[in-house]
Structures are given as C-alpha cells and as structure tokens.
Image: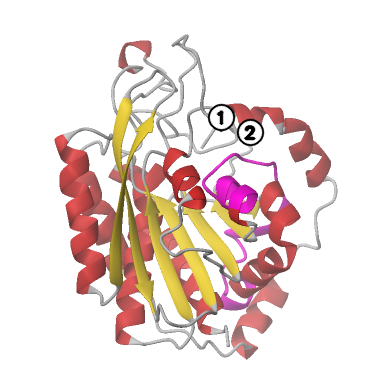
Amino acid sequence: MNFKHIILSCFMIGFFACSCGKNTSNNNQTASTQDYQKVSPELNADSAYHFVDNQVAFGPRVPNTQAHKECGDYLLEQLTKFGANVIEQKADLKAYDGTILHARNIIGSYNPENPKRILLFAHWDSRPYADRDPDSNLHNTPILGANDGASGVGVLLEIARQIQANPLEIGIDIIFFDAEDYGQPDFIKASNETTYGGWTLGSEYWSKNPHVPNYKAKYGILLDMVGGTDAKFLKEAISVQSARGVVEKIWSTARSLGYGRYFIDKNGGGVHDDHVPIIDNLKIPCVDIIQFDSNMNHGFGWYWHTSRDDMDAISKETLKAVGQTVLEVIYKEK
C-alpha cells in the first residue's frame, strides 16, 4: 500500500478519531458473545499460519524472480486443491521505473454460475525494497513480506479450505493480486507514469480487465497486514465512504464473536490499497481490513517495509480473529 496516501490522510486520522463510535465494554462484549450463535465453520489458525509460512519459505516474492514464480504455482495448486474454479490472469505491467513486471493475478471462484457474489482479495507479491528499515544499508534488499502480503493470502487459503468442506450457495471469488507493492521508494528518483503511483498494478489491471465481462459483486473485502501480534483494525476511511454498511457489518460481527479488541470501533485514515482501483473502475463497494498502529509515524506496523517482516511478526490469534470474522460475514449472506 502507498505510504504517501496514508501521510496525506493524516488530517483524516485526526478528524475521524474524534468521531469514533461507542466503545464496547468488556462486560457487554462478553454478554454479546455468549448470546451470539455462530453460523460459520471453525477457522483453523494453525492452518492459516501454515499457509503464511509456506509462502515466506519461498523467499521474497518479487515479480520476475524464481521465488515469485514458484509461489505463484503453489497458490494456483492450493486453490485448485480446495475445489475452486481457478483462472490465472497474466499481464506485463510497467513499474514506476519502466521495468516490465511479468505479473499473475490468481483467481479462484466458487459457484461461478451464481450472479450474487462476494469478492475476497489480498496481494501475494512482496516488496523489492526494505526502504523503511532502520539500517539504510538494507534499503535495496527485498523483504519477506510475512505480514504485508502473505498474511492476507494465508487467511484466504484457509477460507477456501473451509468453503470446500462446507459449501456455500452464494458465489465467492478469491483473488490474489500481483504487483501491489512495487511502488517507487523515496530514495529513488524516477518518472512516474502509472495511474496510482506505481502501486496496486495487479488490481488496477484486473479492475479494467476482469476475468468475467461486466463482473459484479455485492461487495469486496481486502485483507492486508492481518497477522500482526495484537493488531488493531480501525475503519479505513475509503472503505467507510465506499461501503459503510459492510464496514459496520464486519466490525459488529467481530464484536459478536469476541474479537472487539482487534476490530476497534473507531474510524482511521484513508489508505491507497488494492480496493481503490476496484472501487474506481468497477464501482464495487469494498472494505480494506488493514492494521493501523498509532505508535508509528507511518501508521502501519513496526515491521512495515523492513527486513523484520518475517514470521516473527505473525500471530495465530490475529489470523484467527480476522479469518473467523470474514468467514462469519460470508456464511451469513443469503
């Protein structure tokens, strides 16, 4: 996601923080959880963690590298294994510096004949620069992207596994977008001819060339950086503007399941992420579930765009909270 956009929206963070909703007390949350009847299957946090770890084991998944190719093959194999109708969308995309990225959007569809659909998505590539690392000598080093990329994909693979075992009637599309994190770092000066500043290239391409002509979905949910220890998810501003009702549905579901300490009932800043091209080009309401960290000046986790974004940054409890919440939301759809 684009660091510049979160900085430009700092005024929004200050503004929206003042307009937060009512906080749920521990007592009320406990009572609500006890009364709530869950309808979704149980998400396996160990399984989600395993899927994250498997991606990281390939190394940095930077487009045009062997690790990227091997991980893409793995994701195709897993979605196929879990019963999805799988489509691989290949495209040569121009990066901010003119590099041609051989990108692959990987799409897994369930009940493709059903016109009522929910879109779930995450990016699977990792950043070619550790440009926020405290050690400037590492700024040109590709990162593992355990949380920034692999966590969202890992949760969605576990959701795919659950859908196969517990079929839904509604149509579900799971998309792993490529070339999200190849945006221009501050230490490089280059001409920028891309619509979104060199970020979110895969989702931009798909939103203009969807795998199904005139693709429609009731709404979309983006998972980005959803595995950090004690992560906090505020209501991202563009999501609130695009899909306020869906935001409230997700956050209230999280509270009902007992995950209110992760899904904070407050508004946060706006972030340029993979949901933006989809909102802009396909007019599909989308929600970005993304970690905010008020202790960091960039608003993201301590590991963000550094060499420390490895498996030590991943919490099974956070993967569970996010994955179970999303599962519950889609299993409640009629």
Residue 116 percent location from the top left of the image: 55, 79
Provide the residue span drawn in magenta. 255-281
Residue 27 percent location from the top left of the image: 70, 75
The residue lying toward the viewer, choosing from 98 and 42, is: 98
Q: CB of mark 2 within 8 Å of CB of mark 1?
A: yes
Identify the residue at image location x=38%, y=46%: 149
The label number, if any, that marks residue 3 in the structure image: 1
Position above or below: 33 against 324 = below
Q: Secondary structure at mark 2?
A: helix
Label 2 and label 1: CA atoms lie apart by 5 Å
Q: Which amino acid, mark 2?
A: Ile
The label number, if any, that marks residue 301 in the structure image: none
Q: As drawn, is 11 to the left or to the right of 220?
A: right
Number of numbered markers: 2
Q: Is residue 226 magenta?
A: no
Residue 213 percent location from the top left of the image: 48, 63
Position above or below: 15 against 327 = above
Q: Which residue is mark 2?
A: 6
The residue lying toward the viewer, choosing from 217 and 182, is: 217
Q: Secondary structure at mark 1?
A: helix
Residue 298 percent location from the top left of the image: 58, 29
Position above or below: 35 against 150 = below
Q: Is residue 138 visible?
A: yes
Q: Which amino acid, mark 1?
A: Phe
Q: Quadrant of residue 334?
A: bottom right
Q: As drawn, is 43 to the left or to the right of 287?
A: left
Q: Is residue 269 magenta?
A: yes
Identify the residue at image location x=60%, y=46%: 276
